[in-house]
Image (cartoon, rainbow, N blue to C red):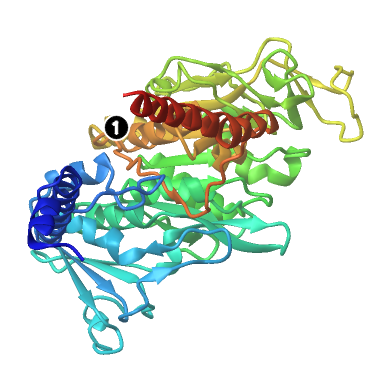
Amino acid sequence: MKTGKGLKKSFSSRNFKMGGFQTLVMVIVIAVVIVLNLVVEKMDITVDLSSNMMYSLSEDTKKVAADLQDDVVIYYLCQDGSETIQIGAGYKVINLENIVRQYEELPHITVEKRDPVLYPNFAKEYTEDKISNNDVLVVNQNTDKSVHVAFADMFNMELDYTTYQEVPTEIDMEGKITSAIQQVTSESTRKIYITSGHGEQVLSNSFADILEKSNIATEELETLSAEKIPEDCDILLINGPQYDFSEDEYTKISEYLSDGGKAMFFTSVMVSKKDMKQYCKLLSDYGVNVAEGVVIDTEQCMSSDMPIVLEPTVESHDVTADAESLPVYIDTVAGMTSQSEVRSTLSIEPLLTTSDSAFSRTDTKATDSNKIDSDINGPFSAAMAVTDEYAEKTQGEGHATKLLVFGSPNFTLDSLISSNQFGNRSMIIDGITWLTGGEEVSTLAIPARSMQEQSVLIEDGDVIFWTVALVVILPLILLGVGFVIWYRRRKN
């Protein structure tokens, strides 16, 4: 048992002082951590550590908010406890409320949460749509204009070939909400009518996304039953019809165009023009002839194995201004040529052209890319811009008839216009601007975020290297350092 003197000596020993100092440091560190946590929690400071910045807003969204004049409220409609989703195994757990709450930091925007169970009639003030958990309502408080963003529309779907069912692979929540903010605060909205009833192709998801994020409304138009092309039609879009228009439909569209209308044609490959007389007549009225068959160009194609996937020459024009330095591809093209003699008010300009050696294959039984006697000689245009100034001379500036004609609806495939990697996207955006003659189309470039977990793959050689380094070499180094320290202390 220690005496009082011995006990006093132990408290003044070197070991006690070192232990006391370490304890004091630990207490100070713990206190600092607790205080910092309280401060951070009080200031609501968060850092987005997700791999694809899932909980951070893009510069496009910040720019839209900075330009706002009206006050906007975002209503997040969700029952408590349903804010977090995980679609399935291999997918990230995503807190949707945390994404919406990012908008609170922006000027003129507030975010309010409403439980659709507690407030079942709240959404009826703004929409007649059925409401689901995690839906969003964007409301302009100055004008009461509103847009409903459905939970199901916030995802990009892909086919799962193991189950043959479509599954969501990307979330586009920010893109949809910011687009809705643009819609409710915009003074005017352009409108595109899309013809139906002739086997037209459905717009690709990326094409529809470009239109939505450019604040352009779309509506299907059955030209057969319509009395005429609606007066609020800014652009008439005809997307790869498989069947011909009737004479009555031809008359309606022709009257719309001759009165200064604007149209975008995507022409499908035609084996027989006699089956598409009225459609071809619409184009020939404006100096555009469509060749039968599909264009083959072994000189200007993606690869020698795919001579029908063209990489045409990009000609200089307002529509191609942002595409001239980028590759442009168009697949399965109906070749076009301009008439040699046209009326004085009409001008036809090629946008995309093939090589001189290109030809159009009409024999569906021929399998190689060598030219045969039945083929039609090129060169061809794969896209053309047409302007007729007749209506402008009679009705005033801005009433010129304008047509954009593409040789294939495949020009707008998702793989070609989902990003700025190819010139196809900019040609569509600049084409809409050119057709409408209005302000430059500003399309939101907000990326959809991947919902799939990212796996880090390590090469076999790297696995062996790091295994040896961490399991063998590093322990030996630490053991050697420890031995040196022990030996020096013992020697001293």
What residue sits 21% from the left and 66% below the top? 1
Residue situated furthest top in the rendering: 356
What residue sits 55% from the left and 27% below the top? 383
Q: Is residue 285 visible?
A: no
Number of numbered callouts drawn: 1
| Residue position for label 1 | 392
Tell whether 295 sits left or right of 77.
Answer: right
| Residue 399 percent location from the top left of the image | 29, 36
**Which amino acid lies under the numbered mark 1 shown in the image of this protein?**
Glu
| Residue 370 percent location from the top left of the image | 87, 17
Q: Is residue 102 visible?
A: yes
What residue sits 30% from the left and 50% below the top? 215
Residue nearest the viewer, comparing 292 with 174? 174
Residue nearest the viewer, comparing 472 with 43? 472
What residue sits 17% from the left and 62% below the top? 2
How crowded pointer 1 is (Cα within 10 Å; few <14, some 14-19, many 20+) is rated as some
| Residue 240 percent location from the top left of the image | 61, 45
| Residue 125 percent location from the top left of the image | 21, 81
Tell whether 358 sits left or right of 257.
Answer: right
| Label 1: element kind | helix
Position of the C terminus, as image quadrant, is top left
